[in-house]
Image (tube, grey):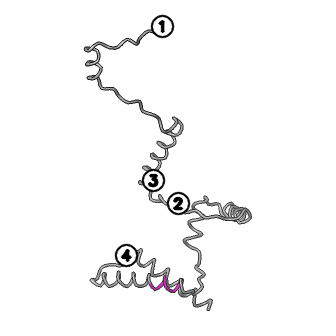
Amino acid sequence: MAKAPKLPSYEEAVKASKKKVEPKKEKLFTKDEEEKIDDLLRRSESDKNRERGITIAFRVSCDERDRIYKRIALSGKKVREFMRDAVLNAPIKAVATRKVVLECKSELERIAEELERLNQNESIPERTLYNLDLVLNILSGATEHT
């Protein structure tokens, strides 16, 4: 015959109910995964203090990649320096499509608003001058191609 389980006395039951029993925490991630998450969080914190915390990526073919890296090697620059310089300082060759014209129009409207605001003899912000020059280059490039 099987033995009956031993039940706690009244005093033992009261003591047990007064003890705070923490439920078992199930781990959602393995230790490796937790370390990777912590590392990513640390990186995102360090990115907040960077001057250049934004990443821009695009896809290319294998042949294009090889040609790009050959140019980078011949330039003597680091990849990020070469890419930044190539994108920011390259001439803009625009075709006067409806989309380009509308984008230039909206940018000119923003610049006009800024210039009206600055009509109080304040200096023009460098970003506004840059945007104005950019639109001018796009429009002059677009008129050359038409």
Name the secondary structure under disc 1.
loop
Residue count near mark 2 (Cα–Cα under 10 Å), binned few <14, some 14–19, many ≥20: few
Name the N-terminal-most of marks 4 and 2.
Answer: 2
Q: Most extreme residue toward the front, as rendered? A: 1
Comparing labels 1 and 3, the label whose residue is closer to the camera: 1
Relative to the observer, which residue lies in front, 45 or 144? 45
Task: Provide the residue designation for mark 2.
Answer: 55
- Relative to 17, does residue 48 appear above or below in the rendering? below
Q: Please tell me the numbered disc located at residue 47.
A: 3
Task: Provide the residue designation for mark 4.
Answer: 125
Q: Tell whether label 2 touches label 4 (CB within 8 Å).
A: no
Q: Please tell me the numbered disc located at residue 121.
A: none
Name the N-terminal-most of marks 3 and 2.
Answer: 3
Task: Provide the residue designation for mark 1.
Answer: 1
Q: Quadrant of residue 81?
A: bottom right
Q: Residue at x 33, y 78 (%)?
A: 123
Comparing labels 4 and 2, the label whose residue is closer to the camera: 2
Name the N-terminal-most of marks 4 and 1.
Answer: 1
Q: What residue type is labelled 3?
A: Asp
Q: What residue type is labelled 1?
A: Met
Which residues are the magenta region? 100-105
Q: Most extreme residue toward the top, as rendered? A: 1
